[in-house]
Image (cartoon, rainbow, N blue to C red):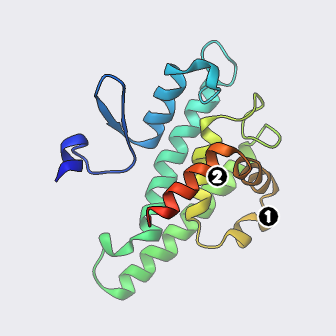
């Protein structure tokens, strides 16, 4: 398969760099692009005070969101019986919601996650919001997250990315 030649893990997304290398994992791509284009504000650069918070929460979202999101969307990958899949899904939804609770408490910007403004973390969080099983319920007691998602959703970059994603049938 051609994709596996580019990225042996087979995961998405993949980013092919100008030198021909291809990397995977959204958090790695966000960090690297921010470092390649420091004026983009995707990644707070050292010595910026938000750098450590950005990296910490980017990794929290990667681990907690990735695990919960995969289990929510694909419980059959973990167990075979329907009753066990239902249990995996129930636990995954609880874990997903717990991650969003932690994010809500950690938001320090308005409307974005960091006080310094829009970053790649906001786009990444918004991607996980897209995967949530019930956005109305998600936002009902998380006003900071709702504001973040609404603000990111108005950016040209996010509008374009979501349109491309949906047109690809993903």
- Are there few (<14), some (14-19), or many (20+) residues within 10 Å of tag 2? few
Where is residue 165 shown, x and y percent of the image?
Answer: 50, 58
The mark that comes first in sequence, 2 or 1, is: 1
Q: Nearer the viewer, residue 84 or 131?
A: 131
Where is residue 54 shown, x and y percent of the image?
Answer: 61, 31
Q: Which residue corresponds to the image point at 42% horizontal and 67% vertical from the top-left?
A: 71
Q: Which residue is outermost to the top?
A: 47
Tell whether 104 sits left or right of 56: right
Question: Please, is residue 169 above or below residue 52 in the view?
Answer: below
Q: Quadrant of residue 53?
A: top right
Q: Label 2: which residue?
A: 159
Q: Nearer the viewer, residue 120 or 49?
A: 120
Q: Label 1: which residue?
A: 141
Question: Please, is residue 16 above or below residue 131 in the view?
Answer: above
Q: Which residue corresponds to the image point at 49% horizontal and 63% vertical from the top-left?
A: 167
- Are there few (<14), some (14-19), or many (20+) residues within 10 Å of tag 1? few
Q: Which label sits on residue 112?
A: none
Q: Secondary structure at mark 1?
A: loop
Where is residue 47 shown, x and y percent of the image?
Answer: 64, 12
Q: CA distance from mark 2 to mark 1?
A: 25 Å
Tell whether 158 sits left or right of 113: left
Query: Can residue 78 be seen in this snapshot?
Result: no
Check contact, mark 2 vs mark 1: CB within 8 A: no
- Mark 2 against mark 1, which lies toward the viewer? 2
Tell whether 139 sits left or right of 70: right
* Quarter of the figure that contains the C terminus: bottom left
Where is residue 110 shown, x and y percent of the image?
Answer: 83, 40
């Amino acid at each position: 398969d051609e994709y596996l030649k580019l990225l042996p893990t087979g995961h998405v997304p993949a980013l092919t760099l100008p030198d021909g290398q291809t990397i995977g994992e959204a958090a790695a791509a966000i960090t690297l692009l921010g470092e390649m284009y420091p004026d983009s504000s995707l990644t707070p650069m050292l010595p910026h005070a938000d750098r450590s918070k950005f990296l910490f929460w980017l990794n929290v979202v990667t681990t907690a969101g990735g695990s919960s999101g995969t289990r929510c969307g694909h419980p059959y990958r973990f167990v075979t019986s329907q009753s066990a899949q239902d249990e995996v899904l129930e636990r995954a939804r609880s874990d997903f919601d717990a991650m969003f609770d932690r994010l809500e408490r950690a938001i320090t910007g308005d409307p974005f996650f960091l006080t310094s403004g829009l970053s790649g973390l906001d786009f990444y969080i918004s991607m996980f919001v897209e995967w949530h099983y019930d956005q109305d319920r998600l936002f009902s007691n998380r006003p900071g997250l709702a504001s973040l998602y609404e603000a990111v959703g108005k950016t040209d970059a996010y509008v374009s990315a979501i349109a491309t994603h949906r047109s690809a049938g993903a």
